[in-house]
Image (tube, helix red, strand yellow):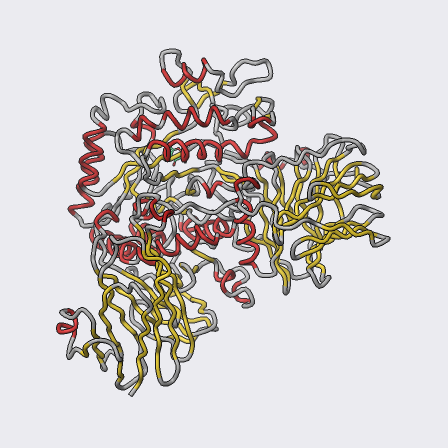
Amino acid sequence: MLTSEQISPDKIAADYTSAFTETLGCVQAAVLQDGLVLFTCENGRLAVGGLRTGIIRVKLLAGAGPGDPIPMHTTAAVIREETNPGGREAEPKLRDTGLSYMIETAGMMVEVVKQDSSLRFLNESGQILAHNPLLAWKEDKAATALFQAAENTHYYGLGEKTGFLDKRGERYEMWNSDNFSPHVPEIEALYQSIPFLIVIEPGNAYGIFLDNPGRSVFDMRASEQAFTVQTETGGVDYYFIAGPKIKDVVGRYTALTGRIQLPPRWSVGYHQSRYSYMDQEEVLELARTFREKEIPCDVIHLDIHYMDEYRVFTFDPVRFPDPKAMIAELKSLGIRIVPIVDPGVKLDPDYYVYREGAESDFFCMKPDGSPFTGPVWPGQSVFPDFTEAKVREWWGSLHRFFAEMGIEGIWNDMNEPSVFNECKTIDPDALHGNDGHPATHQEIHNLYGMMMSKATAEGMANQLGGRRPFVLSRAGYAGIQRYAAVWTGDNRSYWEHMALAMPMVLNLGLSGIAFAGPDIGGFGHHTTGELLARWTQMGALFPFCRNHSMLDTVRQEPWSFGTEVEDICREYINLRYALMPLIFSVFREAAETGMPVIRPLLLEYPDDSNTVNLCDQFLLGDQVLAAPVYRPDTYHRVVYLPEGNWFDYWTGERREGGAHIMAHAPLDTLPLYVKEGAIIPRTAPAASTEFLCSEELLLDIYTPENGEGSFDLYDDDGTTYAFKDGSCNLHRLTVEGTEESVTLRVHPACLGYDGGWKKWTVTFKHLGFAGCRLDFGTEASGREELEALDQGWHFDSTAGELTVVMEQPSEDVELVVRGL
Ligand code: GLC
């Protein structure tokens, strides 16, 4: 416990600001070489170049002399040019304007002022997008880049940080940290470090991605006129990412660092976890209870107690005597196992993983050449050097142990890495091979967890015979989205932490990590029935949906608090499964475009000043708006509906947007709204995504009175990579409403998967017509008659709904509903 002694007068640092006294000085020479402009300045060197349209890389080499080479290799965050079809999109041009050098590259320009080596980024018409007047460093080479900020600047991204959505006035550190203290605004570093800041000024948005996996600081607090990015090692190597819209910035950043891979569908289902389900029988009993209680569940996680004295790649022979049989029984229930795998390998000469790694020198070394050791769950442990390809391959191959048992998903924890020693991680001077660019741990700490997940994802993919693996990771760096989903670590069962999960996961999404979520119900502390009900309502619409809790806390499975809470949990988990066609289509969009699965309203309505810091409600895709209740004993809340009309998902009531409304939300109600013009695909819920085999797709059209909507509906087998060879279905749907008619167009852009829904039931909801006509199959006199038809329609004038049945379209279809 800390006391007031912490703030005794002699402990307060007099000066928070560090003095970066060295600067580049004036430019002495500039040459264009291999697509880069290399500047030799008075006191150092600078490389500036365009990589792709709208992305400029700036690298500072502090103190370098004219002949010193500027190493341009990147970290693993950046998708390398050879793996990026198209590679460099534009050869820059260099122009001497007299007072400055102007670099023209695809879509934009950079001006480097000769007098002081300052940089300005401009668009094609010469408008200034950003100004970096200062690059400076200290004697020890810790460096800073200062950017000017306009008066009304707002900040987003930065991955997994506490606080609100807008990071204005905040300061955060990037240093992957296992911080078990409650996650409060004061905590500057958590498990993930995503050094990517989105800057939004009136009329312009841009991003700064600092590719430095050592410790860095983003400071938006010290000044209102500027923000700074500071590094401890490795100088400054940043990417300016142009907008002008926030969606352009997110799209470009994810083109640079990668997008999520389309996950197996089962991983998008509901996950149940506990530290720990202690033995095989408890796991099976848990699975049976889900089935008895008819609560959907796809995954049960095995926490550390499944292992033999916490040795990774083992099962405890007493508690889990027959994991294969357990997995087989779970499979029949549609449930998969995801075991935890930590990086710490027990230092035990009788243990094969330790022996193999030690024989090949695969563990991180101290400067004296002996392995670095430190205590974690198994006691003294060693840590594989995942920054080396050969170590990743070895680690990946160890996953055969799991794959052979029928396991398809792995949970990577403690991979900051967390060590129970003084510095809380691997010693700063320990050495990493780093794929040919040796570095100390201090220099590349934040890469460790991501490289472990890369090894895991690639190893599992190799073992699974063409099925997609699922990896969950606690730690990460920019690019982690390519390998793993992310959960937000050890939160608590506090209402405040439920509320915090929204801005945190929304900013993770803006930072490329589209597949993320918190421990539903809270990990530490003790949940209550009410908190679990509310949190499950919210979590059911989050990308990653897992209920997890800690040793010695009250049980928090959905049935732990009586039937009312159980019924609510069931209803909302069912909702997730019913909406799986929608959710999975949004996942595909994330994999294709980098847009997050759940979004702050700011992303879709950037010109609406009400969205600047709106983070107690969110959008699923761009059509559904959820506004969770996140306080106890609260049955009403204010909801902001942006421009357009919205429909209450539950009652169908139409609400005009551009306004704050009061939602009534008894405990069983999550305020949920659907945008006019939305096209919402649903299906019959099932106990597991494995059993989501209804032949029928329900397509609800929230008929636009005078407007339009569109949606890309995606489906594939949910497990293999066959979609990459075209074995998937993609229907592009658009709807358009006028006073006289409503038109739905269906365009099958891809039709390679034949296992999907055979029948579509399309319902035009909220039709304003007293009667209507549709030239499509038979007009049925009622729902029953309609059900029996292959192609036809029925208009229910009381409900104002027109329902159409058809076979899944294999060619373009146009339904024109005319009002009478
Ligand atoms: C860490 C993880 C937590 C897990 C526990 C035991 O605290 O964050 O999720 O349950 O370790 O493995």
Apparent side of residue 454 relative to residue 716 in the rendered image (left or right)? right
Q: Is residue 169 visible?
A: no
Dividing the image into four equal quarters, which quarter contains ligand 1? Answer: top left
Q: Position of residue 395 (x, y in %)?
A: 41, 26
**Front-most of residues 745 and 378:** 745
The residue located at (33%, 48%) in the rendering is 268
Above or below, 432 against 359 in this view is below
Question: Is residue 227 at all visible to an observer of this figure?
Answer: yes
* Total marks in image: 0
Residue at image position (39%, 56%) is: 586
Residue at (38%, 59%) from the top-left corner?
A: 628
In the drawing, does residue 782 fall left or right of residue 64?
Answer: left
Given residues 374 and 99, the one toward you in this image is 99
Measured along the vertical axis of the image, is residue 205 above or below residue 803? above
The image quarter containing residue 36 is top right
**Quarter of image, res 538:** bottom left
94, 455: nearer the viewer:
94
| 604 and 185: which is toward the camera | 604
Percent from the top left, x then y, of residue 760? Answer: 25, 65
